[in-house]
Image: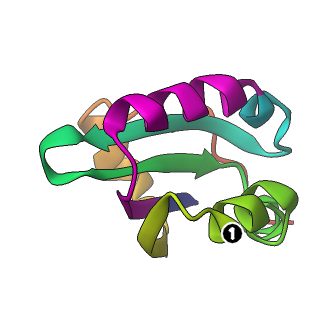
């Protein structure tokens, strides 16, 4: 499962970068999170991330957990958007998407 989170920044990009540098290590402990790609568009004051979870239950637990609760409470962002997507494994593997070894069936 892929989770896409996007938002607009209400603080300077440099301040946002310092903030994420200080919390990035916390994502290493998220159960079922295989990887996170951090996104930043400085010109548009937009940021976010793409997340690959091993199963739906892991993604649901993340959305209900403390990191997302903290994100929702930040005054340094606005226009928060969270979308979930299923991975299309065959064509993703064909185009070298790094997901084939991370996917497990939902149990």
The residue tagged 1 is 73
**Quadrant (top left, top right, bottom left, bottom right) of the N terminus:** bottom right
- Secondary structure, mark 1, is helix
Residue at 40%, 49% (x, y): give it: 11
**Residue 60 in magenta?**
no
86 displayed left or right of 23: left
Q: Position of residue 8 (x, y in %)?
A: 34, 62
The colour style of the image is rainbow
Q: Position of residue 96 (x, y in %)?
A: 30, 29
In this view, 55 is above or below 47: below
x, y percent for residue 23: 70, 32
Observer-nearest of 41 and 56: 41
Q: Which residues are magenta?
A: 5-25
Relative vertical location of residue 76 with respect to residue 25 in this rendering, above or below? below
Left/right placement of residue 79 relative to residue 73 reads left
Quadrant where the image shows the C terminus: bottom right
Give the residue drawn at x 66%, y 36%: 34
Residue 88 at x, y percent in the picture: 39, 59
Placement of 97 over or under 89, stated as above or below: above
Q: Is residue 78 above or below residue 88?
A: below
């Amino acid at each position: 499962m892929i989770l896409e989170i996007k938002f607009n920044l209400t603080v300077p990009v440099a301040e946002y970068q310092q903030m994420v540098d200080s919390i990035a290590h916390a994502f290493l402990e998220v159960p079922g999170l295989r990887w996170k790609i951090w996104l930043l568009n400085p010109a548009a004051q937009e940021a976010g991330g793409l997340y690959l979870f091993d199963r739906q239950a892991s993604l649901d637990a993340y959305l209900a957990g403390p990191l997302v609760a903290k994100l929702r409470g930040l005054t340094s962002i606005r226009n928060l958007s969270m979308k979930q997507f299923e991975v299309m494994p065959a064509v993703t593997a064909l185009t070298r998407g790094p997901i084939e070894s991370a996917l497990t069936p939902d149990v």
